[in-house]
Image (cartoon, rainbow, N blue to C red):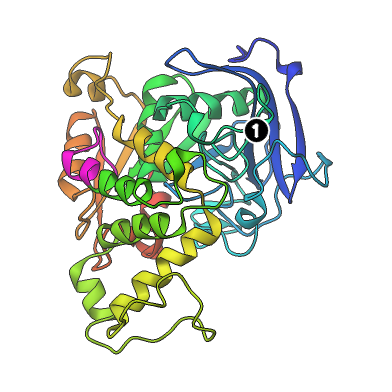
Amino acid sequence: MSQTNSESDTCSVKRIHNTNILFLNDFKLENGFTFSKAEIAFEIYGNLNSDKSNVILVCHALTGSAHAADLVSMNGFEKLENDLSVSPLLKYAAQGPGWWDSIIGPGKPLDTNKYCIISSNILGSCYGTTGPVNINPQTSEKYAADFPEITIRDMVKMQKYLLDYLKVEELQLVIGGSLGGMQVLEWALMYPQVVKRIMPVATSAQHSAWAIGLNEAARLAIKNDPDWKQGKYEKQPQKGLALARIVAMLSYRSQPSYQLRQGRKAAKPYREDNDYLFSNQKQDFAMQSYLHYQGEKLVERFDANTYLTISNAMDSHDIERDRGTIEEVLGSIKAKTCCVGIDSDLLYPADEQKQIAGKITGAEYNEIKSIHGHDAFLIEFDQLGEMVRRLLSR
């Protein structure tokens, strides 16, 4: 087996906050920057078979983590009580329900009785994998705003390091939604010999002007918070990050979804102590208090520089880059493919997934019917699960 890293024995895995962390050396980005030390957080559900040919990789979205399911992760690694180089936010990521609990587990579409499911935190995030909140070994301080620019391809390359360490040479399926779907496409293009099936969900082949614009609005909200301090903050720019989330939430759902759930209902305070970020703002309607709540909830579990880093990486997403036309690039994909769109998705309209499917030989296009917009891939589990079962049977 070929190794992406020079020597697999230069890596080691420990367990911190019940999550597995692979510590590795000399990880080089597309732009030439090299991390002398880096970490990747991951969880494993189910067991590897004897030839390690039963692996499925799931890829998360912008503010997600490796905690895709609330199942016991892989045991056998030495437990560390603490490691100062690892994100302090990691402890929030490995608790409670996973983001795809409904489709990962025994007898579920991603069946842990049959498959070994691997989920890792992406490069640039704040949940255990190296990102802006981690300590730069060269300075003994957080990377913060000095964290280098990264791409989706860098994220996938780091995931390949993890699979090489685990000696996994074949993936039965790579699946993910939104930013996760971008990783899925890059897996099929960067490592075609490894990937047998792909399911990109609610994603795009190239980040559109619309999606870039929404990300820029969110970034400007963060950067115009006085507490941002050019990314060198000690105190999180809370209102800026909360506003970034509010901007995003408007694109994650749809008008019918918000009308059904919030409508013109009266606002309900979500904190009895009346001590929250936007407590000084007038709140007449449930929609207002809902958005305020979603903004504050992200502030409690995420990081502003991380949001900037990952959203910029998403904007760089373009499978044509340095490869050829979109027809040539998608036409080169050999993995069995099912592209999944959502009929009410405002962020990545279904036409984008139809375009991808139409240019991959033998690909299928499936569509989730839902009023809930982009977030339907995290809501409509019955529909998505059936699509997963069909693809795995091919």
The answer to whether any part of residue 393 appears in the image is no
| In this picture, residue 386 sits left or right of residue 117 | left
* Secondary structure state at the residue bearing disc 1: strand
Residue 83 placed where, x, y %? 77, 39
User: Which residue does the image show at 46% across and 81% down from the upper left?
Assistant: 270
Q: Which quadrant would residue 82 be assigned to in this image?
A: top right
Relative to 10, does residue 186 appear above or below in the rendering? below
The answer to whether any part of residue 78 appears in the image is yes
Relative to the observer, which residue lies in front, 25 or 11? 25
Q: What span is colored magenta in the figure?
A: 202-213
Mark 1 = which residue?
141
Callout 1 amino acid: Glu
Relative to the observer, which residue lies in front, 243 or 372? 243
Categorize mark 1 by other alpha carbons within 10 Å: few (<14), some (14-19), many (20+).
few
User: Which residue does the image show at 38% across and 28% down from the upper left?
Assistant: 186
Relative to 59, does residue 26 appear above or below in the rendering? above
Relative to 276, does residue 45 appear above or below in the rendering? above
Residue 382 placed where, x, y %? 39, 64
Residue farthest toward the bottom in the current orientation of the protein: 266
Q: Which quadrant would residue 216 be assigned to in this image?
A: top left
